[in-house]
Structures are given as structure tokens and as C-alpha cells.
Amino acid sequence: DVQMTQSPSTLSASVGDRVTITCRASQSISSWLAWYQQKPGKAPKLLIYKASSLEGGVPSRFSGSGSGTEFTLTISSLQPDDFATYYCQQYNTYPYTFGQGTKLEIK
Amino acid sequence: EVQLVETGGGLIQPGGSLRLSCAASGLIVSNNYMSWVRQAPGKGLEWVSVIYSGGSTYYADSVKGRFTISRDNSKNTLFLQMNNLRAEDTAVYYCARGSGNYDRENFYYYYYMDVWGEGTTVTVSS
């Protein structure tokens, strides 16, 4: 199975900050990576697919980059609505696997 | 508007069976790539199973041989039949629609999950 490792597990930041979350795959997954945002008690919401393509309706302050085994999700200027948990997920190989999540907290 | 609504969750004893349903509106289940993903209490997301429009299915090793994904075209509904349930199957179960990226080099579609239901809770406990 492809292992997905996110860092950090928890991130404290303030409104207006620029933040970056890293996701590493245990083997190359090309660009077949998605990022999701999840708020407590809610379903995950797709933000980014194919490593860097922004899903429709998602604010442009979210961006993704990377290929192969190393990927990043960047939020250019944190807004109050962005405090949530973020997951990366590879869809290159079955079984699909997720990172363990990064909880973005208000500092 | 595309909408997925999961039902069928509940409290079940270990070894029991449960069938989850995912009713779709705004999309035709049989024409789409459809998945189940679960989330144990306080834990991360775990992919469970997928059914392609052509009928091919795949399962996570943790559920293989116990869970079966299927669909009813007349009801436009996706199902997850769960047998021989274990305590570790306790989770919120989400259904999700997949959208495909076409890889011209490999002549293959890679699917990510773009529309999710709100989930149904399964608790396996005596």
C-alpha cells in the first residue's frame, strides 16, 4: 500500500497568515493527489485534485503543488473559515490511502 | 444540484450484518464511479470500496470478503452490504462520487472523489 504522511499534524496560525502543509507518499504517485478540508461533524470537501487543480468554487487562496512523492497545500492568507482539518489522498493505486490529517488551529 | 444521502446506519452487535444505502439525485449512479469511505471516531479517513460504471469493484483489505458494494439502477442507489461486523468497523460511512482525470500516456482514468454525502453512523458493539 502507498503510505501518505502529512506534516505537521497540528498547525497553529493566525488570520492572514500564509500556511503550508506537506504530504509525502511512500512511492511515486505521479500527480494523482487530492486535498480535502473537513470540519467537525461534516463530510470532507474537495479542494484540489491532480495535485494542483483547484476545484470549482474553492477560493483562490488555496493552491497545491508537487509531483512524484512530495506535495504541498498552501493557503495564502488564512481566513476564519479555513480553520479545519486537511487531508491528502492518493488515487494512483488501490487501495486509495489518506494522510493522517493536519489540524489547523487558531493561534 | 448533485446530492448523495446515506442511510442505514445504526447499532449492531459484533458478527451482525447491516446494509447501507446512498440515494443519489442530480446524477445517475450507474453511469458514475462511486465509492465508500469511512471515518472511525476521532480518526482519519479510510477508503473502503469502489464500483466503476462498468461494474468492476475494489475493496480495502480490511473489509474484503465481508463487505459488498452494489447498486440498484432502478432506485438510483448505491449500497454497501456489511457482514460479520467487528468493533473496528465502527465509523461514519460516507458515499462519494468520483470524477476522472484521463492519463493520455497510460490510456487510463484516475478518479478522485468530488461529491460526498453527509454520512451515516455505524456502531458495532455488544
Image (cartoon, coloured by chain):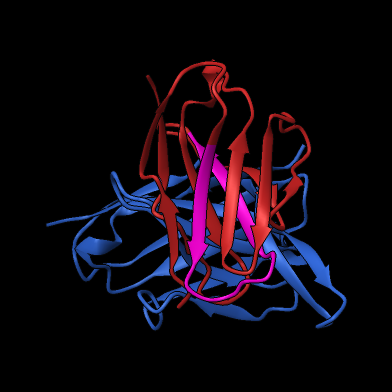
Q: Is residue A27 magenta?
A: yes
- Is residue B21 visible to the viewer in this orientation of the structure? no
Q: What color is chain A drawn in?
A: red
Which quadrant holds residue A66? bottom right
The N terminus of chain B is located in which quarter? top right
Q: Is residue A17 left or right of residue A31?
A: left
Q: Which chain is blue?
A: B
- Give the vertical position of B50 relative to B9 (above or below): below
| Nearest the eye: A72 or B14 | A72
Q: Nearer the viewer, residue B125 or B49?
A: B49
Q: Nearer the viewer, residue A14 or B25?
A: A14
Q: Indicate whether residue A29 is drawn in magenta.
A: yes
The residue under the point 47% across, 72% down is A26
Q: Is residue A24 visible?
A: yes
Name the residue furthest left. Answer: B126
Quadrant in the rendering for residue B100: bottom right
Residue at the outermost right position: B104
In this picture, is A81 found above or below B110? above
Q: Is residue B72 above or below residue B106?
A: above
Q: Nearer the viewer, residue B58 or A2?
A: A2
Looking at the image, residue A103 sits to the left or right of residue A89; the answer is: left
The region drawn magenta spans: A20-38
Q: Position of residue B99 (x, y in %)?
A: 74, 58
**Residue A22 x/y as whole percent:** 51, 50
Q: Position of residue A19 (x, y in %)?
A: 53, 33
- Asked if residue B61 is positioned above or below residue B25 in the image, the reply reads below
Q: Residue at x 77, y 57 (%)?
A: B28
Q: Main secondary structure of the magenta part?
A: strand
Quadrant location of the C terminus of chain B? bottom left
Residue that appears at 54% across and 39% down: A20
**Position of B124 compared to A7: left or right?**
left
Q: Position of residue A57 (x, y in %)?
A: 76, 32
